[in-house]
Amino acid sequence: MEKHAILVASAMIFCVAMAPVYGQYYFETVLAPPRVEKMTRLHFFFHDIVTGKNPTSVPIARPNITGAGTYLTLAAMDDTLTVGPELTSTIIGNAQGLSLYTAKDPTMFGTVLYTDFAFTSGRFNGSSFSLFSRYPITKAATAVGTVVELAIVGGRGAFRMARGYALTRAIYSNNGDAGLEFNVTLYHY
């Protein structure tokens, strides 16, 4: 009888002790096969329209303080990407994201952009890259043709795990509406 009690007690202790082992976090590190990194260069135009009946960028939040103006305004955007500098040029995709207008000093006015550039036609249809960077509006607006560098932080589809940079140049600016030329260099797998 005593042997049976010890056997049952041992089985119960074993079952209780095994439950935490199987319930723990599991991970496995596997060496990935070597991949060849690719470089892709893109050239397109970006149109940010804030005026008219169909704006592509709309303020969604502002501070509730007097005199703040556009300082710390958060805007959502769904801007058009085209082959040429005209709004009527062939559309190749859109840029969706958020921009936060910053700078207490009006001479340093800029925006922090988080934008996903998605291509809806052509060779890269269904692929996108993500940009997260600061765009100094005052600097870009002071001289026509001023080039600003922005950081690329990710991608999907053909641009999976993208990193790189975008060189932008304002091609027009009118009452808040703006057009930018983009020359993008992506490193991806």
Image (cartoon, rainbow, N blue to C red):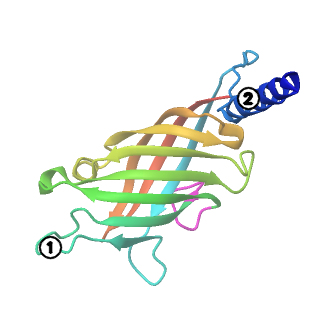
Would you name the residue on which mark 2 appears?
A: 13
Closer to the observer: label 2 or label 1?
2
Q: Residue at x 55, y 49 (%)?
A: 44
CA gap, disc 2 to disc 1? 65 Å
Q: Position of residue 20 (x, y in %)?
A: 67, 33
Mark 2 residue type? Ile
| Left or right of 123, for residue 110 | left
Q: Which quadrant, please, contains the N terminus? A: top right
Question: In front here: 141 or 18?
Answer: 18
Q: Position of residue 90 (x, y in %)?
A: 64, 61
Examine the image and state in which quarter residue 38 appears: top right
Neighbour tally class for label 1: few under 14, some 14-19, many 20 plus, Cα within 10 Å:
few
Please tell me whether residue 85 belongs to the stretch shown in magenta.
yes
107 left or right, relative to 85: left
Q: Is residue 154 above or below residue 14?
A: below
Residue identifier under label 1: 65
Range shown magenta? 81-89
- Between 3 and 158, the one nearer to me in the picture: 3
